[in-house]
Amino acid sequence: MKILQEFEVSHSRERVWEIFDDLSRVASCFPGAQITRPLQNGSFSGQVAMTLGPMRLQFKGDGSLSRDKNNWRGTIQGDGADTVTKSKASAILAYSLSNSSESGTIVQVEVEYKLFGALAQVGRPALVQEVANHLTGEFKKNLNEQIVGENLLERQERQSNSSLNVIGLFMRMLAVRFSFFRSLFSKEKNR
């Protein structure tokens, strides 16, 4: 599956590139994310905590980062697993930075992902897109705060005490499934 996102921040491309060079700072902008082994020779380890309906997920895994300053592009590749639900995920995130007409920066993100296990059963494309939209909004807000100088330690403390809660999205998905099964049973009765 593929997700495309784009957002603009009111800071120079050079400043955004500088922030993106520090993986721990980038992770602090992403709700529930944390770098557990710093970037060394292009590789790192991390974890992401989230709640999806009744499922509390704690993905732990490894990733790699490559960057191309000449073209203002970067790629993050990662694989992770949640030991409780036996769910797995793999993703390749490619980003590019370009100047906007407003002297800010346009950040374009393309994510290719695969879900396995219990998460794959509830992680339908529409639900994943809604989660991605929410995460992009949070990331943009946190990135802006990061650049204007909000205290990094305060944010990291807040991030470690919070996780992404998408229970409303899960409930919508259940409602769609419920109406599907209800229509199946009503067809059976009419036969």
Image (tube, rainbow, N blue to C red):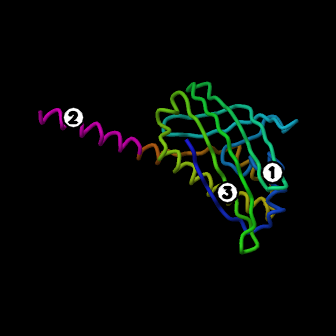
Q: Name the residue under label 2.
A: 185
Q: Is mark 2 on a helix, strand or loop?
A: helix
Image point (32%, 40%), residue name:
178
Q: Which of marks 2 and 1 is nearer the N terminus?
A: 1
Q: Which mark is residue 153?
A: 1
Amino acid at dot 3: Gln
Q: Residues within 10 Å of mark 1 (few under 14, many from 20)?
A: few
Give above or below for 99 relative to 134: below
Where residue 58 sits: x, y (%)? Answer: 63, 33
- Rounded to the nearest angstrom, the CA distance separating label 1 from label 3 is 27 Å
Q: Which segment is the magenta one?
A: 173-191
Image point (77%, 67%), residue name:
11
**Is residue 111 or residue 15 the one in the foreground?**
111
Where residue 127 sits: x, y (%)? Answer: 48, 45
Image point (56%, 40%), residue name:
51
Give above or below for 191 relative to 131: above
